Image (tube, rainbow, N blue to C red):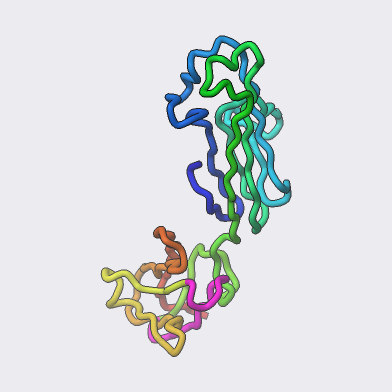
Amino acid sequence: MSSNRLEQGTLAWARIDGLADDETPFAFGGAKYPLRVKWTLGTHTVLQIISAFQTSTAIRTSVQNQFEVLLSAREPGQVQLRVAVEIEPNAKLHFYRGARLYEDRATVVVVEGTQLLQPAIQPRSIRITPNAQIQLKPNRADGTFALRVPQQFASQLTIGGDSNAVLKAFSIGDAVVELQHISIPHNESTFIPISVCIIDF
């Protein structure tokens, strides 16, 4: 799988690279008879399985008997993805121990896309005047994220305050604030554009 943690509205892929530890990808022991591949989900509200060959929402392509599928993250939650490969009876001698069924499972977690609750906008852009400040509040639990200003913008912006979430602006120009998830092992950051400008009324 490309990732087992997805943001709502994003895509990932899952594929079969082999049936056993001693099988090379897609060789499958040189079997001459068909394999039946079946992808299933524990629930269909969190993820949707889409054919890797589907290029339009108007045309539906079956996901059965495909070695690779796309996963569309629909709603926040957790779901188990299961793939089963059934070997036709005439082909079972081509495989390790003559097994008829190979299965694998993976748990996929879908989280809500990162956004600010205060101000209540998607992370597109924040406009602020020089010498002003604003409290930022992401849609993540306290202690799971960190806000910081990249070094090259330190002369324009600072992040401070009790919860280290108060944005202060100084000089006019464009900058960014990094919203970094610190509760997960891999780097996952969202950059929020900040425009420091004088606003005329």
Q: Is residue 155 above or below residue 67?
A: below
Q: Position of residue 51 (x, y in %)?
A: 62, 31
Between 24 and 192, the one lying in front of the other is 24
Q: Position of residue 192 (x, y in %)?
A: 45, 66
Residue 9 in view of the camera: yes
**Residue visible at 42% across and 67% down in the picture:** 180
**Is residue 83 highlighted in magenta?**
no
Q: Is residue 55 toward the left or the right of residue 199 in the image?
A: right
Quarter-of-image position of residue 61? top right
**Residue visible at 54% across and 43% down in the picture:** 12
Between 90 and 143, the one lying in front of the other is 90
Residue occupying the far front of the picture: 97
Between 97 and 197, the one lying in front of the other is 97
Q: Position of residue 197 (x, y in %)?
A: 41, 75
Between 100 and 82, the one lying in front of the other is 100
Q: How many marks?
A: 0
Q: Position of residue 193 (x, y in %)?
A: 43, 65
**Residue visible at 60% across and 55% down in the picture:** 110
Q: Is residue 51 above or below residue 197?
A: above
Quarter-of-image position of residue 113? bottom right
Residue occupying the far bottom of the picture: 162
**Residue visible at 46% across and 68% down in the picture:** 183
Which segment is the magenta one?
A: 130-144
Quarter-of-image position of residue 187? bottom left
Q: Is residue 70 toward the left or the right of residue 126 in the image?
A: right
In terms of secondary structure, what is the magenta stretch mainly?
A: loop
Residue 54 in view of the camera: no
